[in-house]
Amino acid sequence: MLHFEQTFMDFLIEHQERHKRTYHFLILMNAILNSAKRIQYYYLTGALRGNLGLAGSVNVQGEDVMRMDEIANEVVLHYLKKCGRVISVVSEENDDIVMLNPDGRYFVYFDPMDGSSNVPHNLPIGFLFGIAKRNLEGEEDMHLRKGRDYICAGMFVIPTGTFTIALKNSGCFRFHIDEVMNYVKPTKMTLPDSPKTWELSFNPSNWHTYSEKVRNWIEQNEAKYAFRYLGALAGDFHRILTNGGLFMYPAILNHPDPKKNRPEGKLRLMYEANVVAFMCEEAGGGAINERGENILDILPSKHHQRTTLYVGSKKLVEEMREVFRS
Ligand code: AHG
Ligand code: MN
Ligand code: MN
């Protein structure tokens, strides 16, 4: 007997039909899937084709752009434009908003290649995206939406082959890539209550640069949990979503080289922090910044805005909120 797993597209069609939704979102998600599969292909063959090196330019964040960053960005822009449903996008790799289709229905915020330091090693990276819908009535405020106003957010871990997506008020689901490159077999993600499996994840080489409150908390709590750090938010958050615990990217405050201080943290609100925060809340967790504000409630004032991030099990997120309030 052959066994057929449910594909992501079948899952989504069922979801849309059950909620009496239009087919526009399906077309958009088809474009996202096409993008992810293309990036997966280029990444798997990247070492062979010489695509894993530096592109020789610097992005808006002042960081070196990898050849793969450019390829991935081009791929996503191509499919999102072609699907005709996207008004404009904010991409980590473009300084400005990219207008795609004035009649579109959605805004897409994405990081086409997250975790670039893993690229030269062909180790896991992510493709992260968040989607908001335009105001179909009344004036259009365009691009700067809170995470709370996203209708969906998701991430692919590449080339591992997992896809995790949260749909507003409908939960968070994980799929696995199969032999014919379909993402299949939805598993509903819920953060585990029991701290037995919980993990901590942050860049320990930055420890000395964190605020005193954060350093103290780490000192008092790190022995309770296993520590894991891959250096790609998609992969690190992937583990937290399964095992529970806390991922953090704190403010960098006391760096010996003051130019390297990042009082607002490193991660970007619209296409990194919001994406994982949205998935985490749908899986029963939470996400805050160092002001103790929910990530999803922050109204961005610029597209590439950064934020500090604490995301994971509710109990640990609330513990951190208390730490910042004290
Ligand atoms: P990007 O590769 O898109 O610039 O993002 C990298 C981010 C994120 O994936 C990761 O969690 C974090 O940077 C790692 O930073 P450190 O190297 O400072 O730990
Ligand atoms: Mn990134
Ligand atoms: Mn990136």
Image (cartoon, helix red, strand yellow):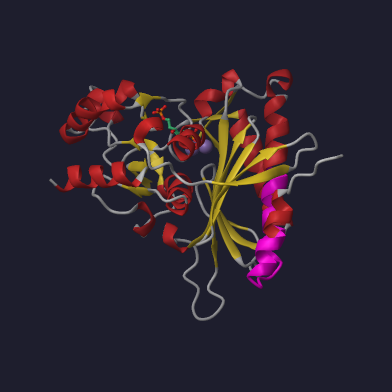
Q: Is residue 14 magenta?
A: yes
Question: Which image quadrant: the C terminus?
Answer: top left
Direction left: furthest residue: 326
- Indicate whether 297 appears above or below 227: below
Question: Which image quadrant: the N terminus?
Answer: top right
Q: Residue at x 44, y 36 (%)?
A: 240
Residue 247 showing in the rendered view: no
Q: Is residue 47 magenta?
A: no
Q: Residue at x 67, y 28 (%)?
A: 43
Left or right: 24 as drawn, with respect to 3: left
Residue 36 percent coordinates (x, y): 67, 41
The part of the chain drawn in magenta is 13-35
Direction right: furthest residue: 1
> Which corner quadrant of the image does residue 62 belong to?
top left
Viewer-side residue, 168 vs 117: 168
Viewer-side residue, 323 vs 117: 323
Q: Residue at x 75, y 42 (%)?
A: 182
Left or right: 308 as drawn, with respect to 134: left
Residue 314 percent coordinates (x, y): 34, 47
Viewer-side residue, 26 vs 57: 26
> Which corner quadrant of the image does residue 255 belong to?
top left
Residue 7 percent coordinates (x, y): 73, 48
The main secondary structure of the magenta stretch is: helix
Residue 196 percent coordinates (x, y): 37, 31
Viewer-side residue, 230 vs 224: 224
Q: Residue at x 50, y 73 (%)?
A: 140
Direction bottom: furthest residue: 138
Left or right: 137 as drawn, with respect to 29: left
Residue 319 showing in the rendered view: yes
- Indicate whether 98 appears above or below 141: above
